[in-house]
C-alpha cells in the first residue's frame, strides 16, 4: 500500500517521527520577584523615554510606572525631568490640543546614543477654552484659568496633573475672565485683569494651601486694557503687557504702575529664566532684560538662529532656553531649538545645543502656549 510522505505518524526513509516541541512560558523577570518598593526604586532611575517600552513587559511594571510612588521616588532621587508641554490651536476647528515634547531613543541606529524628540499629542488631557485662557505651571501641574466657551467668559480653574494625565477643578474665581495676567508669589496665585477694570474683583489671589480665593484691593493709578497679552513674575512683582503698554503689579503694596523700560523691547512669546526676561528682537536676535538691574542687553553667540517667523514661542526648560518656530504658513512645521545660556565677563552668551523638527501637520496651527513642568 502506498503511503504519502505527508501522512501523520510516518517518517521519510524510515526515520522516527519528529517529536512535538513543547512550549514553555518564559521565566518571569527577576525584577518582578522583588518587593514593589525595590522595583519602584529601580524604575525611578530609568529615563522616562523608556517607560512606554517597560510598561509592555508586564501588568505589574505597567501598574508601578503609572503609580504616584514612582514620581515621589524620582523626586527623592533627584531624577526629575523637565517636560515641555505645548498647546496648538487648529485654524480649521479653533480647537486647542495638548502636545508634549517626548524624548525617544533613536531606533535602528545601534551606534547612536542620541535622543529623538517629537511633539506627541496627549488625547487624555482635558479640552480647554478655545481662547482667552491663562496657563501657568506649578511644579508638576498646569493651571488653566478662565477663558471663553460658547462666546461666554468663564471663571473656572482647571488643574492638569501631568504625571498621571488626569485633571481636577479648583474652586471657581469670583470673576469670569479672558486673557488675564497671572503670577505665583509667596504661595499665592494672582490673577489680574481679563475683565472690566471697574470690577471689585479685578485682582484675585488663590491661596495654594487653604484653596480659597480672595479679592485684592489696591492703588491702580494707570489705565490698563481689559485684556492682557503676556505676563511674568520676577522679584515678587507681576509684569503685565497689554495692547499698548507694559505695567508692573506689586502685590505687597497693592500698586499697579507703568514700566516704560520693559516696554521698549518686550514682545509676545517671551519667557523667564533665572529671574531674567528673554524675548525676541528684530530678525534673529534675542534680548535679555534684568528687572533688578533695570537693563536690556543682547544675547551673544546666536548668529546662526533663523529669522523669527510670526507666532514663535519661548520656554524655560530646566534653565535652558527652548524656542519653537512655526516655519510654515499654510500647514504646520514646528522646529525646536534648545539653547544653553551662560555669563562671560558680564555678558550673556547663548550656545545652540540642538535643533530639530518637532512636528509636521497638514493643517495650519497656532502655538498658543509652551511651558515646562517637572516630572
Image: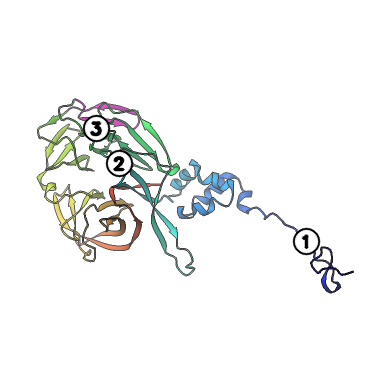
Asked if the residue under mark 3 is in contact with the one under mark 2, i.e. CB atoms within 8 Å, the reply is no
The disc at residue 120 is none
Instruction: Name the residue beneath numbered marker 2.
Output: 136
Magenta extent? 200-217
Instruction: Give whichever of 250, 171 is nearer the camera.
Output: 171
Q: Residue at x 75, y 58 (%)?
A: 22
Dot 3 lies on which element?
loop
Front-lying residue, 340 or 89: 89
Find the distance from the CA under tag 1 to the CA under tag 2.
63 Å
Q: Nearer the viewer, mark 1 or mark 2?
A: 1
Q: Quadrant of residue 197?
A: top left
Name the residue rendered at 43%, 46% in the picture.
Answer: 75
**Residue shown at the point (47%, 63%) measured from the top left:** 107
Q: Of all residues shown, which one is farthest toward the front?
A: 1
**What residue is pinned by disc 3?**
177
Q: Is residue 2 left or right of residue 34?
A: right
Using the rendered view, name the quadrant where residue 187 is placed: top left
Q: Dot 2: few (<14), some (14–19), or many (≥20) neighbours within 10 Å? A: many
The residue wearing badge 1 is 20
- Residue 154 is one of the magenta-drawn residues: no
| x and y, in percent, of residue 29 in the image | 62, 54
Q: Is residue 211 magenta?
A: yes
Amino acid at each position: 500500500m502506498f503511503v504519502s510522505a505527508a501522512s501523520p505518524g510516518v517518517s521519510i526513509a524510515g526515520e522516527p517521527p519528529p517529536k512535538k516541541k513543547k512550549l514553555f512560558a518564559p521565566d518571569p523577570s527577576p525584577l518582578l520577584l522583588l518587593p514593589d518598593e525595590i522595583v519602584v526604586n529601580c524604575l525611578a532611575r530609568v529615563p522616562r523615554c523608556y517607560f512606554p517600552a517597560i510598561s509592555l513587559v508586564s501588568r505589574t511594571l505597567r501598574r508601578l510606572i503609572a503609580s504616584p510612588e514612582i514620581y515621589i521616588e524620582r523626586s527623592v532621587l533627584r531624577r526629575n525631568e523637565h517636560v515641555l508641554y505645548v498647546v496648538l490651536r487648529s485654524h480649521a476647528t479653533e480647537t486647542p490640543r495638548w502636545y508634549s515634547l517626548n524624548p525617544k531613543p533613536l531606533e535602528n541606529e545601534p551606534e547612536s546614543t542620541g535622543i529623538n524628540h517629537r511633539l506627541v499629542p496627549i488625547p487624555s488631557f482635558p479640552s480647554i477654552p478655545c481662547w482667552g485662557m491663562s496657563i501657568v505651571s506649578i511644579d508638576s501641574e498646569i493651571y488653566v484659568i478662565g477663558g471663553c466657551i460658547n462666546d461666554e467668559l468663564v471663571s473656572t480653574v482647571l488643574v492638569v496633573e501631568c504625571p498621571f494625565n488626569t485633571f481636577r477643578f479648583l474652586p471657581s474665581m469670583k470673576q469670569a475672565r479672558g486673557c488675564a495676567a497671572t503670577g505665583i508669589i509667596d504661595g499665592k496665585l494672582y490673577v489680574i485683569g481679563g475683565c472690566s477694570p471697574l470690577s471689585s474683583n479685578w485682582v484675585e489671589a488663590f491661596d495654594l494651601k487653604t484653596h480659597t480665593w480672595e479679592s485684592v484691593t489696591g492703588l491702580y493709578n494707570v489705565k490698563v486694557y481689559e485684556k492682557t497679552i503676556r505676563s511674568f513674575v520676577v522679584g515678587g512683582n507681576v509684569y503685565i503687557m497689554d495692547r499698548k503698554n507694559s505695567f508692573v503689579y506689586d502685590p505687597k503694596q497693592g500698586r499697579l504702575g507703568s514700566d516704560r523700560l520693559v516696554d521698549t523691547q518686550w514682545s509676545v512669546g517671551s519667557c523667564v529664566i533665572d529671574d531674567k526676561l528673554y524675548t525676541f528682537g528684530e530678525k534673529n536676535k534675542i534680548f535679555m532684560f534684568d528687572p533688578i538691574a533695570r537693563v536690556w542687553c543682547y544675547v551673544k553667540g546666536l548668529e546662526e538662529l533663523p529669522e523669527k517667523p510670526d507666532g514663535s514661542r519661548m520656554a524655560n526648560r530646566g534653565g535652558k532656553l527652548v524656542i519653537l518656530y512655526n516655519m510654515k504658513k499654510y500647514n504646520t512645521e514646528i522646529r525646536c531649538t534648545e539653547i544653553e545660556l551662560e555669563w562671560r565677563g558680564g555678558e550673556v552668551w547663548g550656545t545652540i545645543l540642538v535643533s530639530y523638527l518637532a512636528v509636521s501637520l497638514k493643517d495650519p496651527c497656532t502655538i498658543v502656549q509652551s511651558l515646562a513642568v517637572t516630572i
